[in-house]
Image (cartoon, rainbow, N blue to C red):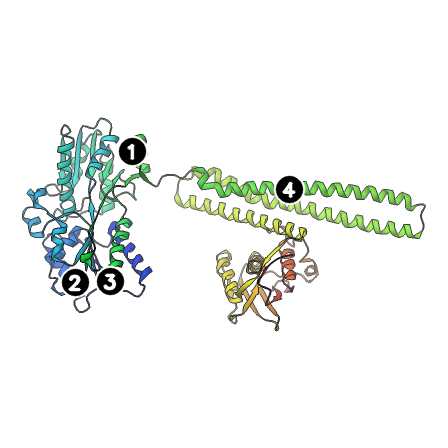
Amino acid sequence: MVVSSYGTDYQWSNTIMNTIGKQLKDKHPSIEFSREFLSSEMLEDSDSWGNKMSVLLSNYKKNPPLAIILVSDEAWMGYQDADVSAFKNVPLILCAVKPHSISISDFITKRDSLHLSDFTPTVELMKNYRATAVLREMNVPGYLSLMENLISGLNRFVFITDSRFYGVYTHLLLQQEAERSYPKIPVESIDGRFVSTDSLLSLLPTIPSTAGVLLTSWLTGEYGFEFSKDYLYSSIENKLSTPIFITNDIGLEKENFVGGYYNDASFWGNKTSEQLLAIINGVMPENLKPETYYDSQCQIAWKVFQHYGLDSRRLPAKVDFFNAPESFWSVYKYYIIAVISVFLVILLFYYYTLRSNFKLQQAQRLLLNSVNEAQAANDKLKKTQDELIVALHKAEESDRLKSAFLANMSHEIRTPLNAIVGFSGVLDEVDTKEEREEYVDLIHRNSDLLLQLLSDILDLSRIEAGVLEFTFSKTDAHKVCNNVVVSLSNKCRSGVKLYLAPSANSMPLCTDVNRLMQVLINLVNNAIKFTSEGSIEVGYFSYNDELAEFYVKDTGIGIAAEKQAVIFDRFTKLNNYVEGTGLGLSICQTIVSLLGGEMGLESEEGTGSRFWFRILKNQNAVEHKF
């Protein structure tokens, strides 16, 4: 059971609780994890903390938890003031509690005149319980030093602290450290014990830009919590001409404040989880030494820091910037690599075309010589002449197909490349997050298209070179097909359903999983391209003892009967207005053939298509090259 000092909307304590819950569930998934909220910032009287804690604990009397975790000081103070007799044997862990504590009664009676001498070391008070702790020591010298380094012409400190324990305790520490280390710099306090929220907002415009302003938080139940935290902190920022330093992560996500020294909420969650897991594993809490951690991490909001023109050279060596812009290379490195790769592919194909043209010219010269010799030759030479003419026709047809392929590739590559270059060029000028995410999504999709074109070209080169690689391993047809369906479902148009056949059951295979998925993905992608409504079904079954049949069935536009004979030929595209190289089905047919099977289709124009292929169920589980 974990009890937060604050309400359900307090992000800092929520992050701590989430971190503890995740660490617990990772190690002990069967243990129930309960969350409770004291909501001290909403309780007008501090003496009600103990009563509220008693009410929260009463729900657990019949079934006490394995351990109780108290997040921050108000929960710890309420626990000391509550009736906890039923929990005297339950281990207690204090999380992010300060090294010094005070009872609720003393806090109430002495609140307006408290001194540090009124506080008691927390470890002394813990002796009354089966307790251990992860204590938080405030980096007070760090806060003041950071303001001194970054505020030009610093001539006063202004501490804005609320009336909660956290605000009062931190105020006393700041006052003491400022008087000791900076005796010549005056201190001005805006203290929630004596100042209302309205008075705070009216005082802020009088603070000059040469003041170092530090805010702990402003949650003042005694004076009325009239505004939401986001609105209040935004109002505080707008009324000041100097940056506001903080002792925790309040306002950082909204980029209201410049930052300060504090450890992330997840840090406290992880440290507390270590003690909780040790207790669950049998270590007595009395044997776990309380740990005290110093707020050593300097956190800075990049945009606020830049807005006030602060000097980064005066920051400490170890700084964690919030929302700092990424470098151009880190953002676009994959796109740059993709563009360079495509450019190299174009160069390779240009070289390949030149070499093919040279060979064609050689064949033409040989043909002319043969024709001249054939004029004086017999029937045998005539036959040779006819064979050379046939060879010429084949070479010319090959050249035509390659020229068509290069023209198609030029179009296919240029289209996504233009999109990548165009949208990358305007990305820095986009104002809204939604528009930026849309442009990034377009760049991603066009990059994926370029990589697919490159993959088809490389596979074709391996096939022609006879070095296509296969690695066989055991798998299951249901797992392979289901992965394909899940990975491609979001590519379907609205109104089109991609699903795995309901009759598909487990079917063990020993084959090349990657090549099998390559064929299935290619067939499903083709179905997605030509299906605007209806469904796409992926299925398989045992064809016989040796073969397994896979199929992709769609309700798309179908293929005319006279065009089905050439559908598996290289560079064949039945619709030049649809993206693709015309290589996919040819590569798939080659892969299926090398897996010991065959491939075919059944289609009717206007109704849909069913592509199928059969492969051997069992291959030797070793690596091969074909």
- Assess disc 4: are there few (<14), some (14-19) or many (≥20) residues with their C-alpha within 10 Å of its C-alpha: few
Q: Are marks 4 and 3 in contact (CB under 8 Å)?
A: no
For disc 4, the marked residue is: 348
Percent of width and height locating residue 563? 69, 59
Quarter of the rendering containing residue 241? top left
Circle 3 SS class = loop
Q: CA distance from mark 1 to mark 3?
A: 45 Å
Q: Give the mark toward the camera: 4 or 3.
A: 3
Which residue is at 20% across, 60% downward? 284
Q: CA distance from mark 2 to mark 3?
A: 24 Å
Q: Are marks 1 and 4 in contact (CB under 8 Å)?
A: no
Circle nearer the N terminus (1, 4):
1
Residue type at the position of mark 1: Leu
Circle nearer the N terminus (2, 1):
2
For disc 1, the marked residue is: 315
- Assess disc 2: are there few (<14), some (14-19) or many (≥20) residues with their C-alpha within 10 Å of its C-alpha: many
Circle 4 SS class = helix
Circle nearer the N terminus (1, 3):
3
Residue type at the position of mark 4: Leu
Percent of width and height locating residue 603? 64, 64
Residue type at the position of mark 2: Leu
For disc 2, the marked residue is: 57
Quarter of the rendering containing residue 611? bottom right
- Assess disc 1: are there few (<14), some (14-19) or many (≥20) residues with their C-alpha within 10 Å of its C-alpha: some
